[in-house]
Amino acid sequence: MNQTAEEVIMSKIDQQQSEKMLKTGLAGSVFAAICCFTPVLLWTFGAVGLAGIVGGLDYILFPMLFASLGLVAQALYAHSGSQGKSPKPVIILLVIVFSTAIIWLQFFYAIRISIGATVLVAIYWLYLRAAQTQSVS
């Protein structure tokens, strides 16, 4: 099937946007993970005299991590060129569930929940990749 010039241009724009979204999501995920699981923020805030507020940052950083992973999942969907129903509502629901669960459990299982969310995104990427391979052949 031949594509018009407009469709080709729109496809390239969508591809660029999904790549930008993927890079942004990955950068946010790495930043949040570094800040959540290492004492980088403690040292930084302590150096400028703001160590007292570090305890409350987990309430911001973990939801940021899950939102960034959700952005990565949406970008992977857009990058794969899938034409099916958008997974955005499911991704938003999972971000809310993971964020609520980690806060409700008082961060006791923070590493396990974060790894689980990351593995879920990786499995979704493998699923999209397999679906794309099947549609090509």
Image (cartoon, grey):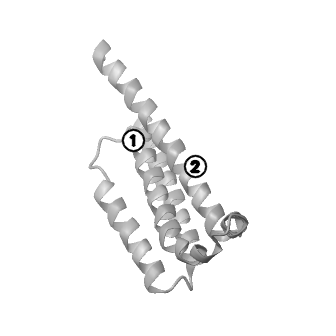
Type of residue at label 2? Answer: Ala
Q: Earlier in the sequence, mark 1 or mark 2?
A: 2
The residue at 48%/51% (across/down) is: 72
> In the depicted view, which residue is nearer to us: 32 or 84?
32
Residue 74: % across, % down: 40, 49
Quadrant in the picture for the N terminus: top left
Q: Secondary structure at mark 2?
A: helix
Q: Would residue 58 be found to the left or right of residue 18 on screen?
A: right
Q: Which mark, residue 78?
A: 1
Q: Quadrant of the C terminus?
A: top left
Residue 87 screen position, x and y as percent: 32, 54
Q: Position of residue 133 (x, y in %)?
A: 47, 41
Position of residue 1 relative to residue 130, above or below, is above
Query: On the image, numbered disc 2 is attached to which residue?
Result: 27
In the figure, is residue 12 to the left or right of 47? left
Q: Amino acid at mark 1?
A: Ala
Left or right placement of residue 132 versus residue 108 in this view: left
Q: Toward the viewer: 109 or 37?
A: 37
Q: Position of residue 46 (x, y in %)?
A: 70, 69
The 10 Å Cα crowd at callout 1, few under 14, some 14 to 19, many 20 or more, is many
* Residue at left offset 54%, top offset 71%: 57
